[in-house]
Amino acid sequence: MKIAFFDTKPYDKPGFEKYGAVHGIKFKFFESMLNEDTVELAKGADAVCVFVNDSVNAAVIDKLHEMGVGIVALRCAGYNNVDLKHAFGKVHVVHVPVYSAYAVAEHAMALLLTSIRRIHKAYIRTRDFNFSLNGLTGFDLHGKTIGIIGAGKIGRVMANICRGFGMHVIAYDKYPSGEDIEFVELDQLLKNSDIISLHCPLTKDTYHLIDEKRINKMKKGVLILNTSRGALIDAEALLAGIKARQVGAACLDVYEEESDVFFNDNSGHILDDDTLARLISMPNVIVTSHQAFLTNEALENIAEITTENLLEFQKSGMCKNELCYHCGKDEKCKAERMKKCF
Ligand code: NAI
């Protein structure tokens, strides 16, 4: 099998080279992101392997289909960058549903602790031999309420971590399940949480879930954590909320317009995105560039599961991790088409 691997970073290669060698899969690594301008690079490949900011839109799908590329293998869980409806009947789409919920939840907690204990400020001060504590006063997490939006795999790990700190955990989920977490309505969560952490997927429903209206329903001084997808938050509204002191702090591992900026060294350039520049300039905002997934364990799992997905397809023309606009994960629907999505 030949795979065109887009948006390659140095940390991607070791795992994929290792599992590729074991299973006879040849990855051709490209630094470019997949989009309409670069899709030709996939010529001759059986599949493309893509990440969160590659653009798998209708035009790209049509071109892949025309070139005989049959599979889009996402090496991530989220798939908001893929036009699944358009892909149906043309290219199969597979993803890695779970690789390490711990990686993401632990990063969310790392951001939270950094923010409330001002570690990012202290680190810079002590490197400059400035040992003053003025302005570094934090607050205890113990006894505070965290509202988790999206109590799935990552949200639930985050809930457990927070319980370890003696926090009160409440959650809102469109499809609540299980009794291990206290579910509340969204408005109740917004009103009662000292900290709000986003762990739901980006869908039409959740686009700008956190907007001006909802920010104004939150507790004054609320801390907002987003390690899910940037467009869950209206960044302009967040900025306004911070300026109005309604939002006490924000920790963002994802950003609405991240695809042109994140994952790259732009240190020698002038940032065109004024909203991002303004957010980063705020003393109470911490931005990491979609780093939450980046642990050794997660990278290893991503490479292993992506390779298995490709092998499963090669052997049987089916894959348990296929994403299908038509039937979702409804096995009954697949069964009607001899277990295949198409
Ligand atoms: P999951 O599918 O296990 O959980 C998502 C939860 O959100 C589910 O319980 C679902 O019912 C809920 N949900 C769906 N629509 C909702 C809505 N409209 N309102 C409220 N809740 C809703 O997914 P998992 O593995 O926990 O991942 C969550 C998200 O984390 C992914 O969609 C992805 O965007 C993001 N992510 C970010 C990473 C990073 O590096 N920053 C890495 C991996 C995932």
Image (cartoon, rainbow, N blue to C red):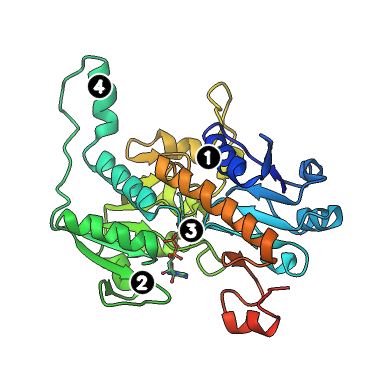
Q: Earlier in the sequence, mark 2 or mark 3?
A: 2
Q: Residue drawn at (26%, 52%), measured in percent from left and top?
A: 221
Q: Secondary structure at mark 2?
A: helix
| 2 or 1: mark nearer the eye | 1
Q: Residues within 10 Å of mark 4 (few under 14, many from 20)?
A: some
> Rounded to the nearest whole Å, what is the CA distance between mark 1 and mark 4?
37 Å
The amino acid type found where label 3 is placed reads: Leu
> Which numbered tag is attached to residue 220?
none
Q: Position of residue 114 (x, y in %)?
A: 27, 39
| 1 or 4: mark nearer the eye | 1
> Rounded to the nearest whole Å, what is the CA distance between mark 2 and mark 4?
39 Å
Quickly name the residue at label 4.
125
> Rounded to the nearest whole Å, what is the CA distance between mark 2 and mark 1?
40 Å
Quickly name the residue at label 1.
15
> Which numbered tag is attached to residue 232?
3
Quickly name the residue at label 2.
186
> Rounded to the nearest whole Å, what is the CA distance between mark 2 and mark 3?
14 Å
Q: Residue drawn at (50%, 52%), measured in percent from left and top?
A: 230
The amino acid type found where label 2 is placed reads: Leu
Residue 155, relative to residue 1: is it above or below? below
What number of labels is visible? 4
Q: Nearer the viewer, residue 294 or 194?
A: 294
